Amino acid sequence: MAEPGTASAARVRQEAKGRELLADSGALWSALPVEWPREAEGGSAAALPGWGWRVRRSLAALLLRPRRSFQHVHEPVDHAAALRLLLTVRLPLWAALLVTLGLAGPTAAIQEGIPLFDARLVEALSLWLLLMAPVGVPLLYASLGIATHVALALTGGAPRSIAATLRATGYALAPALLGVALLDLPLYLGQLTLPVYLGGLGALTLLTFVVAGNALTGTHQIPAIRGFVVALVPAAMFAATQVLRAVLTLGELPGYTPPPGLPYLVP
């Protein structure tokens, strides 16, 4: 086992190597460190930074340099790297939420329920969607990418492959999924109202739209206006899926009060 001082020095060398590669665009395997191999040429003496450093730097690149992050696309696309990033930003807080709910139980009171649905059914659906997060992330990755590629084809053609589009929309989703993980904590613990959640989701949707527009523009080398028009598709799909989860969790529809006497409504 390496001594603490040795491990710390190795980590400093690894991070220095990573910063050197980020500064020298000609030496990059990818502008997103999560796509780099485990080690640089030369073996362990030139080892690259660990996964945590790569995730932080990749998120920073997506937020600060979204167009540059997608100027070069290596095919075949490494979908596993994109999914690892999405699961890394989504699942740790999800696991913490499950542990909290398991120890304390749901703290939100049962709401009236969505009109025409029993309140207990709404609660069960909400819990099922929460438990399905590890499966939902890959499904969201695939569905957003496919729908976006179809939109590209219908608006003038897609210069790059569908795999490149999946990569672009997948990475564009990463910062917003981290925000979703943060919002889920107060949402499922009953400390968040629907209007407040919708405000936070609106900001995350705008972020997805901006990063996806840049990602599509850089990946397919298309005019920016077309890239951002097509980016409306993944942004809208992301917002719709998250609104559905919030509505089921809180048991209410925005701006709607169910009239009395609905046959399946249990007050």
Image: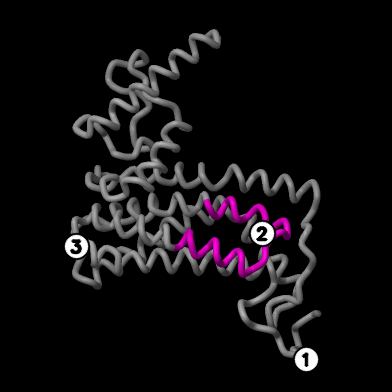
Which residue is label 3 attached to?
Answer: 223
Question: Which x, y percent locates residue 115?
Answer: 69, 82
**Dot 3 amino acid type:** Pro
Question: Which x, y percent locates residue 109?
Answer: 79, 65
Residue 1 drawn in magenta? no
User: Please, is residue 97 above or below residue 15 in the view?
Assistant: below
- The disc, 1 or 3, on the residue closer to the chain's N-terminal end is 3
Which residue is label 2 attached to?
Answer: 187
Residue 202 drawn in magenta? yes
Which quadrant would the N terminus be assigned to in this image? top right
Q: Residue at x 76, y 88 (%)?
A: 263
Tell me which corner region of the image, top left, top right, bottom left or bottom right, holds residue 173. Answer: bottom left
- The disc, 1 or 2, on the residue closer to the chain's N-terminal end is 2
Q: How many marks?
A: 3
Dominant SS of magenta comes to helix
Question: Which x, y percent locates residue 34?
Answer: 38, 37
- The disc, 3 or 2, on the residue closer to the chain's N-terminal end is 2
